Amino acid sequence: MARLAGVSQTTVSLVLGGNKQGIAIHEDTRRRVLQAADELGYVPDPAARRLAAARNNLLGVFSFTTTFPTAVEHSYYPILVGVEQEAAAQGYDLVLFTGSSAGRRAAAPGALDRVRLADGCLFLGRHIPAQELRKLVAHGYPAVHIGRRDELAELAWVGVDYAAAAAEVVRHLADFGHHRIAYVREDDDAPASTDREQGFRDAAAGAGVHGGVVRSARPATDITAEWVRARRDEGVTAFVAEETDTGAAWRALYRAVAAAGLEAPRDLSLGLLGSPPADLNGPGHPEPTGFDVPRAELGAAAVRLLTSLLCARQGAEPLVTCAFRPGVTAGAPPRSP
Amino acid sequence: MARLAGVSQTTVSLVLGGNKQGIAIHEDTRRRVLQAADELGYVPDPAARRLAAARNNLLGVFSFTTTFPTAVEHSYYPILVGVEQEAAAQGYDLVLFTGSSAGRRAAAPGALDRVRLADGCLFLGRHIPAQELRKLVAHGYPAVHIGRRDELAELAWVGVDYAAAAAEVVRHLADFGHHRIAYVREDDDAPASTDREQGFRDAAAGAGVHGGVVRSARPATDITAEWVRARRDEGVTAFVAEETDTGAAWRALYRAVAAAGLEAPRDLSLGLLGSPPADLNGPGHPEPTGFDVPRAELGAAAVRLLTSLLCARQGAEPLVTCAFRPGVTAGAPPRSP
DNA sequence: TTGTATGCGTTATCAA
DNA sequence: TTGATAACGCATACAA
């Protein structure tokens, strides 16, 4: 212990620790302590100081997937990047939990209690063990879910402002002069889907355009060239699809349009509420008119909300805004059908 | 504290902790403790645990890059997945230590001390703060570096057996009948590059083939169609490139061959020591003959080595083997040049 | 089978 | 300006 080499003990803590209280220390003493610590290679034990300080500067990230999100849930990855960056900026380290961490399952009773080792925790995933989470929150544990979550009123969350972003796309189309727009979505009740549809509907109503919604469990077989032609015959000039994990809605629409021998934006306009799947992205594929989900920003916002909870601060913004992407698949409707 | 809900204190520790000593506990007591802990959502404080028992079932991962896998996503992320899986399998949770937390840099004195909160730590990154790491290791802290590291003799590491994998590719080409092979690498001294070249040279010598090595700082401008033709005129029938973060060597070679109007494996054979960059991968691009780096396996091996260090166990294998990928860019050399 | 007492290395409070 | 001393929450040896 450096205290032996030096002269005291508390002093060591004062010198080597932050000395938050601003207690004055003699320069000689300070130097002696520093030198002794250097010679002995002494370093304050982080575990001990955290025990005394009653916090450990650890933020948890719990993902309700078996392992940490790999290829399939690739949409999670950029979120993690944002989480990591913001956490680092605020001086927190991250503890990673997964459904299978330490051999337990996420839904198993007590599985979520492990996160208490962190000062607060972020939750991530489609299906959440509501019971367990509720218990955690009820005990006053700081938790933030990434993605809108209304089932648990007590649970704080950050989400993407899909409604606003969807509305922007609709208005963009309306401005081009489209009066009838068809919306293709998968048969799913994820908040992200619901919000997009709501934004679509509201904006359509607001802009005085007729917006028809198609909800399909199997877009690949439902959304065909015939379907596109039929809608066009009804006067539809623009088609909008939602983005999902699989990208099925957009892929179906995209292929159906191609199969019908039509081209955007010449014959019709296309909008995508999100980003295209990997196989329809990049050179060789037109950039869809739509928006990009700011996933990294979402992660960062989650961290900000969580740390504001930790410090009883106010003012973290729960909704992040999407960036509109003009793209090349939307334009004025053809003169006459 | 669960002790209030239950009946004791030591007992709680016995039930919830590992109970390594195998002390017998009444089943009723055990159940009561478990239930109380569940209701209160109680979980042992890791810091206290580490302080008292000198362990807390936490494994650290420290990356020397600013943030986790942003820029190098394809490279680091799969490793992290492997780390996570193996850690989970062994009952450890993961702590991600950020290189540049709160404005500090990894090389700053004391920047690495945080990791001692965990029982042991994995290190990851191109440039390592040798001084700080040496101090850590000198103090007996269990540390494992992911990637070969010879600068610090005391530092344990796991790495990829690039030499063997490179040799396998060369032998594959030699078996096809190639006698002159050109090797393109970037001008870089990373162990991964050095090992590959060594494997290439050794295997070439062993197979009696002439292997010329080109080291280029700017492959894009150095490796041209003319260059390829010149080599072919010298009798070179196969070209091998190394994989790096940027994929520059392979990209240059690939484009030069195309620009020369040549095609693999008809006119020449191509090998890639690693995986192609994203823009040259997937449909539309031939699968290069070469090997895949088992990054997840690398991460898992790192965890195994680290935990073997923790338990003073023996027998963790430091080198992971690459999987040979036949691909479609190599074949027999053309009959006559 | 369970409870008591002690120590782990810091920080924080209070005296000196 | 510096030194005792009491938590911090847990694990472990030991007593009951």
Image: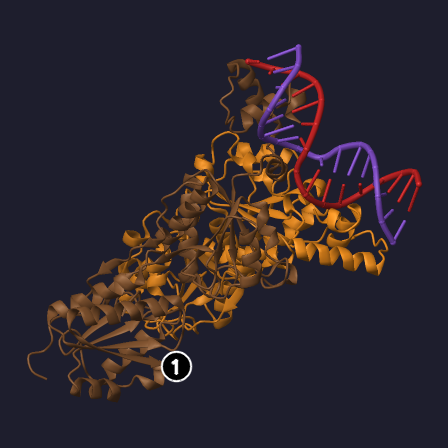
Chain colours: A orange, B brown, C red, D purple
Picture quarter containing residue A247?
bottom left
Image quadrant holding the C terminus of chain A, namely: bottom left
Left or right? Give the position of A248 relative to A27.
left
> Residue B167: where, in percent of width, then height?
23, 65
> Residue B99: where, in percent of width, then height?
56, 60
> Residue B225: where, in percent of width, then height?
25, 86
Can residue A144 be seen in this snapshot? no
Can residue A210 be seen in this snapshot? yes
The amino acid marked with disc number 1 is Ala
Q: Nearer the viewer, residue A79 or B27?
A: B27
For mark 1, does the 10 Å Cα neighbourhood hold few (<14), some (14 to 19), or many (20 or more) residues?
A: some
Left or right? Give the position of B206 relative to A8.
left
Residue sitting at x 45%, y 34%: A104
Residue sitting at x 73%, y 53%: A16
Residue pointed to by mark 1: B217
Residue sitting at x 30%, y 83%: B223
> Residue A195: where, in percent of width, then height?
52, 51
Question: Could you tell me which secondary element the residue under label 1 belongs to?
Answer: loop
Picture quarter containing residue B33?
top right
